């Protein structure tokens, strides 16, 4: 069984521990390791992960260039293993120029965390950047859902897709961390891609299957959200759902390769 982790976070060594602690504090959760590239691979090796979508989110505009340079360097150091998603921030003077640079760097998409960035998914100032991402066929991975805010609400993503229907989006966390009813209501089958991380462990197996089948077996991708969770736990939960080997292989690996047009 080929396995890809389609949503994992890494940070430069000098800030990895601090960044990991900060994420844990934001969600009031205990983290499962420090978010370095080495620790990510060590955790993934336990279940045979061969490829990773790696990303990091800028919480301030002045962080954007350094983060994208870091993700590019890590992708370059591990070709065929790390597939980097860059980031942008609404506070940049020229957001479109950074989308252009992400494309030039050879990164595979863009990661945004509306809650960390305190920016609505459907923020009007972001629309030109979204349209450029659509033109360049750069998928955008959105953190989705949080009962404390509506920056990342599913209805906002639905609103964005009405305005930029050609944009490819990944609605993380089965469409909405702790807001799965909203995901079911506003994100219809076939409209978006999604991943399994920070979700399956927080619901019953029946609810997980309802959500996975709502989005479609060809649109769901296995993910860890490392360093939030360890890979072994995420695999155990997913395998417990009892899907066939064909479906499991699609979600574990093949859908990711199809989305990013990777020959595997």
Image (spheres, helix red, strand yellow):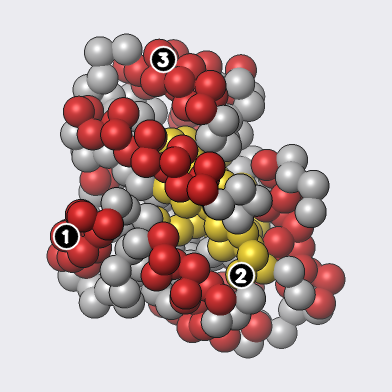
**Residue 26 x/y as whole percent:** 18, 60
Instruction: Read off the residue under disc 1.
Output: 18
Q: CA distance from mark 3 to mark 1?
A: 30 Å
In the rendered image, is residue 200 in sight?
no
Q: Quadrant of residue 248?
A: bottom right
Q: Quadrant of the C terminus?
A: bottom right
User: How far apart are labels 2 and 3 at the CA level?
Assistant: 34 Å
- Kindly identify the residue that appears in the image at 65 percent across and 83 percent down: 239
**SS category of the residue bearing label 1:** helix
- Image point 55% across, 52% down: which residue? 78
Give left or right: position of 88 versus 5.
Answer: left
Q: Report the side of 176 relative to 79 (left or right).
A: left
Which percent across, then down, holds residue 144? 40, 50
Q: Which residue is mark 3?
A: 96
Identified at 45% across, 20% down, the residue is 101
Mark in front: 3 vs 1: 1
Q: Residue furthest front?
A: 77
Q: Residues within 10 Å of mark 1 (few under 14, many from 20)?
A: few
- Is 225 placed above or below 257 here? below
Q: Closer to the camera, 6 or 104?
A: 104
Q: Quadrant of residue 120?
A: top left
Total number of numbered labels?
3
Q: Which residue is mark 2?
A: 49
Q: Are marks 1 and 2 in contact (CB under 8 Å)?
A: no
Q: At which x and y percent is residue 134?
A: 58, 23
Q: Is residue 3 above or below residue 6?
A: below
């Amino acid at each position: 069984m080929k396995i890809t982790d389609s949503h994992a976070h890494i940070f430069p060594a000098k800030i990895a521990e601090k960044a990991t602690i900060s994420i844990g504090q934001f969600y009031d959760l205990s983290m499962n390791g420090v978010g370095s590239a080495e620790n990510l691979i060590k955790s993934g090796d336990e279940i045979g992960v061969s490829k990773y979508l790696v990303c990091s989110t800028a919480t301030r505009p002045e962080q954007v260039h350094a983060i994208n340079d870091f993700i590019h360097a890590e992708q370059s150091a591990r070709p065929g293993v790390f597939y980097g998603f860059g980031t942008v921030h609404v506070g940049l003077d020229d957001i479109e120029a950074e989308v252009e640079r992400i494309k030039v760097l050879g990164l595979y998409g863009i990661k945004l965390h509306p809650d960390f960035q305190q920016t609505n998914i459907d923020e009007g100032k972001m629309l030109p950047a979204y349209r450029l991402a659509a033109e360049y066929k750069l998928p955008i991975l959105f953190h989705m859902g949080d009962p404390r805010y509506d920056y990342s609400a599913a209805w906002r993503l639905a609103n964005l897709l009405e305005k930029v229907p050609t944009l490819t989006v990944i609605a993380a966390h089965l469409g909405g961390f702790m807001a799965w009813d909203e995901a079911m209501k506003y994100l219809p089958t076939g409209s978006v891609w999604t991943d399994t991380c920070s979700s399956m462990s927080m619901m019953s197996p029946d609810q997980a299957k309802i959500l996975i089948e709502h989005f479609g077996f060809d649109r769901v991708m296995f993910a860890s959200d490392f360093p939030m969770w360890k890979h072994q736990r995420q695999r155990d939960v997913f395998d417990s759902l009892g899907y066939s080997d064909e479906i499991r292989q699609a979600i574990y690996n093949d859908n990711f390769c199809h989305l990013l047009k990777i020959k595997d």
